[in-house]
Image: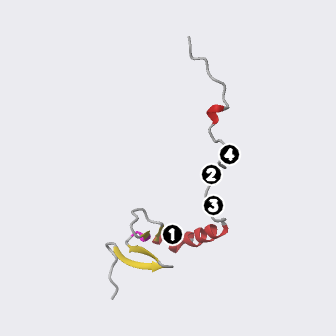
Amino acid sequence: MVTVLDKELKRRVTVDGVDCTVAFGPEGIRLTGKGKRKSEVELRWRDLLSGKAAMVVALNASLPTRQTATRPEAGQSSNRSSSRSPKNRAR
């Protein structure tokens, strides 16, 4: 006999040394990092069965990794106000 999944079931799991919480619920699966509120991965049962989940995994694998924005060099000024001409505010 199989038990109906009518409420959320949470378990702790360690992935590559990082603690996470996996939540199985009636809507799907959520993976949340330890100490985080927002889930990192959500997968609905409907998407898993329809094949959308496999398409998303393939799309994410084809994208390049996200790179962080670089800050300007110390000699370069990112302040644009110095290059603008002063406005005449007297009326």
For marks 4 and 3, give the one nearer the viewer: 4
Position of residue 76 in the picture relative to residue 18 (left or right): right
Question: Distance between the Cα atoms at labels 4 and 1?
Answer: 51 Å
**Mark 1 surroundings: few (<14), some (14-19) or many (≥20) residues within 10 A:** some
Residue 62 is situated, as x and y percent measured from the top left of the image, at 67, 68
Circles 4 and 1: CB atoms closer than 8 Å: no
For marks 1 and 2, give the one nearer the viewer: 2
Question: Distance between the Cα atoms at labels 2 and 4?
Answer: 11 Å
Q: Identity of the amino acid at label 2?
A: Arg
Question: Distance between the Cα atoms at labels 4 and 3?
Answer: 23 Å
The residue under the point 32% across, 73% down is 6
**Mark 2 surroundings: few (<14), some (14-19) or many (≥20) residues within 10 A:** few
Q: Which residue is mark 2?
A: 71
Instruction: Answer whether residue 80 is magenta in the image.
Output: no
Q: Which residue is mark 4?
A: 75
The residue under the point 62% across, 54% down is 69
